[in-house]
Image (spheres, rainbow, N blue to C red):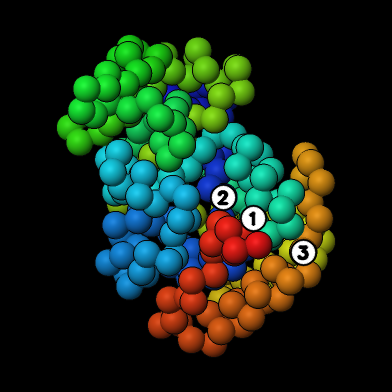
């Protein structure tokens, strides 16, 4: 039994704009930023509010997942009306590969170790600093267990970090937060011959699905399905919202 399973974790989650699901399902993998760049995606594919921080702080080579079922960032995207989905990945798929844990918000925290800044203190429950990392992470089984035992019961958003990419098994589930999104996802996965299950779940907070955003997402999905070589058009919620 792995350290996540031992603490009762059954699924690990990855959150994505609905339209990016086409790329994820086609490769059946979640890729790090550096792996996505090698696959032909340019900088407009990534969240404008987090990309530079992730890379600068030493986390650009990781695929980012979390243990939280509906974290704050997902709630904020849904509250703004932009379709997002969650991928629920069986914990054994994560525990089959090397992974690290981080209990701090990699992109948003201002407490980093660089220059004259000391950053967070190292400990078993906080994690350790590794070369080129400005935020501590847990890599050893001992540190992972200590971090989980202290912070998991408090509902902390613990990130699960897999270097390079995480291949997704057939038992992956796509969780949608409206019946309309569920229908879009089911149709898209069927066209990709993807065997993942699709679930409809009630969001913890209101999701006022925006017709304008939905139209952009639908156009994106249609083009991505027609052309497997297409790498997107820069549709990314943080850029859209910054123009409004």
Callout 3 environment at 10 Å: few (<14), some (14 to 19), or many (20+)?
Answer: some
Q: Nearer the viewer, mark 3 or mark 2?
A: 3
How far apart marks 1 and 3 lie (CA) works out to: 15 Å
Q: Position of residue 239 (x, y in %)?
A: 54, 62
Residue sitting nearer the eye, 92 or 128? 128
The kind of secondary structure element at disc 1 is strand
* Residue at mark 2: 15
Callout 1 environment at 10 Å: few (<14), some (14 to 19), or many (20+)?
Answer: many
Q: Nearer the viewer, mark 1 or mark 3?
A: 3
> Could you tell me which residue is drawn at 30 percent across and 47 percent down?
55
Is 2 placed left or right of 135 in the picture?
A: right
Q: Is residue 177 above or below residue 221?
A: above
Q: Position of residue 41 (x, y in %)?
A: 37, 70
Q: Earlier in the sequence, mark 1 or mark 2?
A: 2
Q: Earlier in the sequence, mark 3 or mark 2?
A: 2
> Could you tell me which residue is drawn at 44 percent across and 65 percent down?
45
The answer to whether mark 3 and mark 2 are in CB contact below 8 A is no
> Could you tell me which residue is drawn at 74 percent across and 49 percent down?
79
Q: Is residue 113 above or below residue 53?
A: above
Is 108 placed left or right of 138 in the picture?
A: right
> Could you tell me which residue is drawn at 25 percent across and 33 percent down?
133
Mark identifier at residue 85: 1
The answer to whether mark 1 and mark 3 are in CB contact below 8 A is no
Mark identifier at residue 210: 3
The answer to whether mark 1 and mark 2 are in CB contact below 8 A is yes
The single residue placed furthest to the front in the displayed view is 243
The kind of secondary structure element at disc 2 is strand
């Amino acid at each position: 039994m792995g350290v996540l399973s031992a603490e009762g974790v059954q699924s690990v989650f990855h959150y994505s704009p609905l339209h990016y699901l086409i790329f994820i399902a086609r490769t059946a993998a979640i890729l790090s930023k550096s792996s996505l760049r090698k696959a032909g995606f340019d900088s407009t594919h990534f969240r404008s509010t987090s990309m530079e921080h992730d890379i600068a702080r030493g986390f650009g080579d990781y695929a980012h997942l979390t243990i939280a079922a509906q974290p704050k960032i997902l709630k904020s995207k849904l509250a703004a009306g932009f379709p997002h989905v969650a991928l629920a990945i069986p914990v054994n798929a994560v525990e089959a590969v090397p992974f690290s844990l981080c209990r701090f918000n990699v992109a948003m925290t201002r407490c980093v170790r660089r220059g004259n800044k000391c950053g967070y203190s190292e400990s078993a429950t906080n994690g350790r600093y590794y070369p080129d990392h400005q935020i501590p992470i847990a890599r050893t089984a001992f540190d992972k267990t200590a971090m989980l035992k202290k912070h998991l019961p408090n509902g902390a958003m613990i990130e699960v970090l897999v270097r390079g990419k995480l291949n997704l098994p057939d038992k992956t589930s796509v969780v949608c937060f409206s019946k309309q999104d569920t229908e879009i996802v089911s149709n898209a996965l069927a066209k990709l011959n993807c065997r993942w299950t699709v679930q409809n779940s009630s969001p913890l907070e209101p999701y006022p699905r925006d017709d304008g955003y939905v139209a952009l997402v639908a156009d994106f999905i249609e083009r991505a399905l027609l052309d497997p070589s297409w790498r997107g058009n820069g549709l990314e919620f943080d850029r859209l919202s910054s123009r409004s």
